[in-house]
Image (cartoon, grey):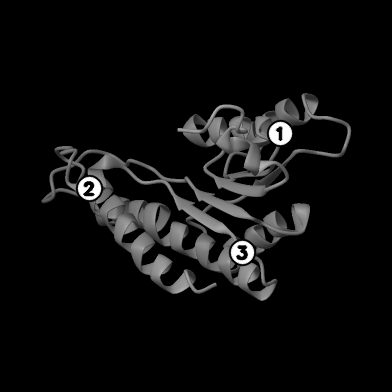
């Protein structure tokens, strides 16, 4: 608990540049709004550019006149390759750095029996929830390292990945979120030295 008279913990966020994936709706959108209120500069990234523009317009309309507080970057975490890397570069260029990455993009996918799960749906879910998360973190962290900046990576997962929430028919979702937990731990072991 903070001592009396101490500033609230979120006041330390003032001026931080935060990239939020999956920012066009749900918790990603709420992250962007709350981070902007805390004084962060926000790079809102997702596939739905129209929703991103609306979100950034809302944030910027309430911001002081010191320039934009939020910038929209169209980014499909499942795109992979040079398209994804180019989107991360646009995100970096928006404010000249990224201090915090919130890897929030993800999908639940359809519900199927493990025996009936279509391979293309499995591939899409893993590509979005796990591969995309890793690639965005990889491209952001390389830029942080090369710029000699310290930063944070926050990977949003699910209780389904902790073997605490059993979701019948969601083997793909639960498996991808378990992998997110493990990947986060492994990446942390490497990045802690930076």
Q: Position of residue 3 (x, y in %)?
A: 52, 32
Q: Position of residue 53 (x, y in %)?
A: 70, 34
Q: Is residue 133 above or below residue 58?
A: below
Q: Is residue 148 above or below residue 182?
A: below
Q: Is residue 134 above or below residue 165?
A: below
Q: Position of residue 109 (x, y in %)?
A: 32, 42
Q: Residue 56: which numbered mark, if any?
A: 1
Does the residue at mark 3 contact the one at mark 1 (Cβ under 8 Å)?
no
Residue 91 seen in this snapshot: yes
**Is 92 on the left-hand or right-hand side of 110?**
right
**Which residue is drawn at the image coordinates 70% and 36% (left, top)?**
39
Front residue of 149 and 129: 149
Q: Residue 150: which numbered mark, if any?
A: 3
**Which residue is drawn at the image coordinates 29% and 54% (left, top)?**
176
Q: Mark 2 Cα within 10 Å, few/some/many (few <14, many 20+)?
A: some
**Which residue is drawn at the image coordinates 59% and 39% (left, top)?**
48
Does label 2 or label 1 sit earlier along the sequence? 1
Front residue of 146 and 121: 146
Q: CA distance from mark 3 to mark 1?
A: 26 Å
Check disc 3 and report its element: helix, strand or loop. Answer: loop
Q: Residue 162: which numbered mark, if any?
A: 2
Of badges 3 and 1, the one in the foreground is 3
Of badges 2 and 3, the one in the foreground is 3
**Is 107 on the left-hand or right-hand side of 61?**
left
Does the residue at mark 2 contact the one at mark 1 (Cβ under 8 Å)?
no
Front residue of 135 and 144: 144
């Amino acid at each position: 608990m903070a001592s009396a008279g101490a500033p609230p913990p979120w006041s330390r966020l003032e001026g931080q540049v935060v990239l939020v994936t999956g920012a066009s709706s749900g918790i990603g959108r709420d992250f962007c709004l709350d981070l902007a209120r805390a004084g962060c500069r926000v790079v809102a990234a997702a596939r739905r550019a129209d929703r991103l523009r609306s979100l950034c317009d809302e944030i910027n309309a309430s911001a002081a006149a010191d320039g934009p507080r939020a910038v929209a970057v169209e980014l499909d975490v499942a795109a992979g390759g040079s398209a994804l890397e180019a989107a991360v570069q646009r995100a970096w260029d928006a404010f000249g750095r990224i201090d915090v990455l919130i890897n929030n993009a993800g999908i639940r996918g359809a519900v199927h029996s493990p025996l009936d799960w279509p391979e293309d749906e499995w591939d899409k879910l893993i590509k979005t929830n796990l591969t995309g998360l890793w690639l965005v973190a990889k491209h952001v962290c390389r830029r942080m390292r090369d710029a000699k900046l310290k930063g944070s990576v926050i990977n949003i997962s699910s209780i389904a990945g902790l073997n605490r929430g059993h979701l019948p028919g969601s083997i793909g979702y639960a498996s991808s979120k378990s992998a997110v937990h493990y990947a986060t731990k492994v990446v942390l072991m490497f990045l802690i030295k930076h």
